[in-house]
Image: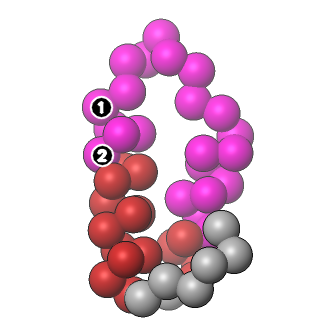
Amino acid sequence: MKKTMTEAEKNKLLREKIQQFLHADPMDVIGDDTILELIDLENEK
């Protein structure tokens, strides 16, 4: 995601990703990319 985002947009996206992550079925495979994206978003703050 190279597009510049405002803090509000970043926070909204992060919340959505975390909600998806928390509500994911344990049987679903959550890839390393998803985890890395969450970490990247956190680090951008």
The image shows residue 42, relative to residue 38, as above or below, that is below
| Residue in the picture at 62% in, 78% down | 3
Q: Any magenta on residue 39? A: yes
How is the protein colored in the picture? secondary structure
Task: Please state if 30 lies on the left or on the right of 23 as rendered.
Answer: right
Q: Is the magenta stretch mostly helix, strand or loop?
A: helix
Residue that numbered label 2 is attached to: 19
How far across and how far down the image is residue 25, in percent?
38, 18
Type of amino acid at the residue the image marks with label 1:
His
Residue that numbered label 1 is attached to: 23
| Residue in the picture at 43% in, 17% down | 26
Type of amino acid at the residue the image marks with label 2:
Gln
Task: Please state if 26 lies on the left or on the right of 29 as rendered.
Answer: left
> CB atoms at circles 1 and 2 under 8 Å apart?
yes
Q: Magenta residues, as a range?
A: 19-40
Figure quadrant of residue 20: top left
How far across and how far down the image is residue 16, in percent?
33, 53
Which residue extends farthest top? 27
The image shows residue 27, relative to residue 8, as above or below, that is above
Density class for disc 1 (Cα within 10 Å; few <14, some 14-19, many ≥20) is few
Density class for disc 2 (Cα within 10 Å; few <14, some 14-19, many ≥20) is few
Q: What element carries label 2?
A: helix
